[in-house]
Image (cartoon, rainbow, N blue to C red):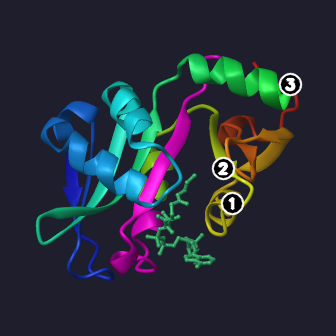
Amino acid sequence: MEIFKDPSIPGYQFEIGTTGDFQAEHEAIAALVASRGQVDVEKVREHLPAATIVAVARHNGTIVSVCVLKGARAYNRRVRRKSGFPLGYDVPELGYAATRTDHEGKRLGRTLHNEILKRVEGDVFATVRSTNPTEPGILERRGFQREGRPWKGQGDYTIVLWYRKAPSRANTRDDAR
Ligand SMILES: CC(C)(COP(=O)(O)OP(=O)(O)OC[C@H]1O[C@@H](n2cnc3c(N)ncnc32)[C@H](O)[C@@H]1OP(=O)(O)O)[C@@H](O)C(=O)NCCC(=O)NCCS
């Protein structure tokens, strides 16, 4: 696990590791993610153990921000079908981004997104509710583009597929495996 502090963000410690590194804190992470209202706590509990990378920011010993690279899973097939975009079954998903409200706007989410993306060699995707005010901009500024067609979510919103091609292949067109 990599642990570091950023002098420009005093008071926080950043930790990037495997899901196993955070085994004892899965419930706390799931609760944090669910508290931001974008994902059900059961879904986080179910999928966190299969995550490839877990990145957190800690303040006074407590995890206050998280971002995860999920392992490829059956969800890819569903996204492919619903979006009409030829999403590869092995493409990992960036998700479960959540910062506790009292720690928002301190560049924690930014740092965790960047740390995860630094470690992704190939393509990566994310799915975001159409009503989300912040995440689309975060993804767009990091090279993600909207792909396919949005599909209906479980509430009064659609879900949008965001996709980032591997940097080395960003200029090629034949990339959708
Ligand atoms: C999205 C979220 C994780 C960002 O966390 P954060 O720690 O506040 O993020 P940061 O302070 O690092 O800001 C990240 C970026 O968003 C921008 N941003 C932050 N707050 C914003 C706001 N209210 N409106 C627009 N942009 C905003 C910042 O300028 C920054 O941009 P950049 O890094 O691309 O230059 C946090 O707002 C959150 O938990 N939201 C609810 C859950 C959610 O929507 N998760 C995504 C689900 S797919």
Q: Which residues are magenta?
A: 86-111
What is the distance, in whole Å, between disc 2 and disc 1 at their CAs?
7 Å
First in sequence: mark 2 vs mark 3: 2
> Quadrant of the image for the C terminus?
top right
User: Horizontal and vertical percent for residue 71?
Assistant: 46, 26
Please, what is the three-letter code of the amino acid marked with disc 3? Answer: Asp
Residue 79, above or below 65: above
Residue 63, located in which quarter of the rendered image? bottom left
Q: Is ligand 1 closer than 8 angstroms to the Cβ of mark 2? A: yes
**Circle number at residue 136:** 1
Relative horizontal placement of residue 114, taking residue 21 as reference (left or right): right
Please, what is the three-letter code of the amino acid marked with disc 1? Answer: Pro
Q: Residue at x 68, y 66 (%)?
A: 137
- Disc nearest the viewer among 2 and 1: 2
Relative horizontal placement of residue 26, taking residue 108 as reference (left or right): left
Q: Callout 2: helix, strand or loop?
A: strand
Residue underneath mark 2: 128
Q: Residues within 10 Å of mark 3 (few under 14, many from 20)?
A: few
Residue 153, above or below 11: above
Marks 2 and 1 in Cβ contact (< 8 Å): yes
First in sequence: mark 2 vs mark 1: 2
Residue underneath mark 3: 174
